[in-house]
Image (cartoon, rainbow, N blue to C red):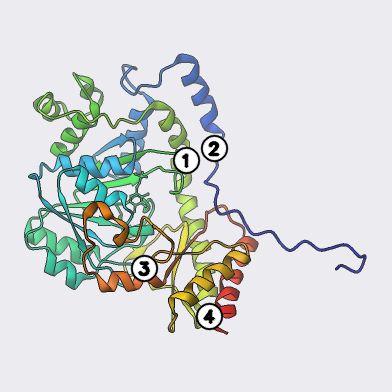
Amino acid sequence: MAPDGQTIAPPAAPNVHDAESIPDAARAEIDRLLTSGDLFRYTAPADAPVALLEAEFAALMGSRYALAVSSCSAALFLSLKALDLPRGAKVLIPAFTFAAVPSSVVHAGCVPVLVEVGDNYRVDMADFAAKLPGADAVMISHMRGHTSDMDAIMALCDAAGVPVIEDAAHSLGTVWGGRKIGTIGKVGCFSFQSYKLVNAGEGGILITDDPEVAARAIIMSGAYEENWKKHPGLGNSCAHWQNRLPLYNLRMQNLSAAVIRPQLPLVAERVVKGRANHDAVAAVLNASPWLAVPEALGPEDRAPDSIQFNLAGGWSDDEARAFQSAAKARGVSVQVFGLSQGNARAFWNWQFLGDPPDLPQTRAMLMRACDVRLPTRLSAAELDFIASAVVAAAVEVKG
Ligand SMILES: *Cc1c(COP(=O)(O)O)cnc(C)c1O
């Protein structure tokens, strides 16, 4: 009670559920599209919003070609199809990723091979090197933006002649040794789903410097008849592949591009803000003996919009569950990947693959790794609220 007898409301827990709001600049363009009805990317003779987005995204990333599609999952699927892998080809993926990744491999008629991930959320290079012989492709998922050792991965894959696809769904803005994530492998795939750095509800894009991969992906995305002529610089390759490849119709529509384009100039500041937010919360959590935010590998500069940390110093499953409840009671939603029922990021829930493989390292990590969203819009006070609630919840359980 305050001295005047009124109840002081406790500070409200910040809303971390909502996505980024859409810049006002999108409104005029959306109005124009609604009035003209010009929603299909291939109706306008030139300069459709989707085509402009592709040009702008390729320029932003410094890559030769970009193809906007309906989701990052669609981009991952098309990348595998564009590599022309034989049916049943083995594709290495990290065992810590989102279910959409093994799903895209299955969708492309390939077989995912799961690679162990350490308690720093990065691919275990010994297991990777052991499983690479016999693999036809590698799909590296930079889960939550955490970057595995891309130097070691590229050296092994280049020596073996195995193409690398980067699942950079959640890594827009992350840099590895001065190179933009998504430009290191043969193809990079990004998501514009609402919980990523650029919010279009749904959407994805793939980038590549390889004209054959780009042409094949363009045709299969649904550039039927001579619509591929609206993709610059690929005339000969696209003419060759027209009618020789199936059409999967995974195109992006103009309304999505209108929502995405005004957000691209905001990416750089969202990256800076996200990194500062993450590091502020990480410093508070790392001061607790019960919580540990793993160090990034040296060459990584990440663009986080969430934080992951491990329950450290010996926790039982029941204590970890009690910690989740104690944080929730303080208004902060903490997800322990392996403890939340049916979590799509826990490999043993991917029942469509059959019996789960034996991956003790990844399993142990998932049972103690925690996930908290930190949208870049949060204020210092809100970040403080979240960090204090998480630490207090750990203290409540572990004393
Ligand atoms: C979100 C996400 C995906 C899937 O992206 P969609 O655009 O929803 O298909 C794939 N991989 C990772 C690592 C993701 O975070």
Q: Find disc 2 in the rendering and name its residue.
A: 23
- Label 1 amino acid? Gln
As helix, strand or loop, the secondary structure at mark 2 comes to: loop
Q: Earlier in the sequence, mark 1 or mark 2?
A: 2
Quadrant in the picture for residue 210: top left
Could you tell whether 270 is left or right of 204 in the image?
Answer: right
Q: Earlier in the sequence, mark 3 or mark 2?
A: 2
Number of other residues with Cα within 10 Å of mark 1, as a class: few under 14, some 14 to 19, many 20 or more: many
The reply to whether residue 388 is visible in this rendering is: yes
Residue 366's mark? 3
- In the rendered image, residue 202, in percent from the top left (x then y), is placed at 41, 38
Q: Earlier in the sequence, mark 3 or mark 4?
A: 4
Q: Which residue occupies 25% across, 61% down?
A: 94
Q: Find disc 4 in the rendering and name its residue.
A: 288
322 or 30: nearer the viewer: 322
- In the rendered image, residue 162, in percent from the top left (x then y), is placed at 10, 55
Residue 263's mark? 1
CB contact under 8 Å: marks 1 and 2: yes
Q: Nearer the viewer, mark 3 or mark 4?
A: 3
Number of other residues with Cα within 10 Å of mark 2, as a class: few under 14, some 14 to 19, many 20 or more: few
- CA distance for labels 4 and 1: 37 Å
386 or 178: nearer the viewer: 386
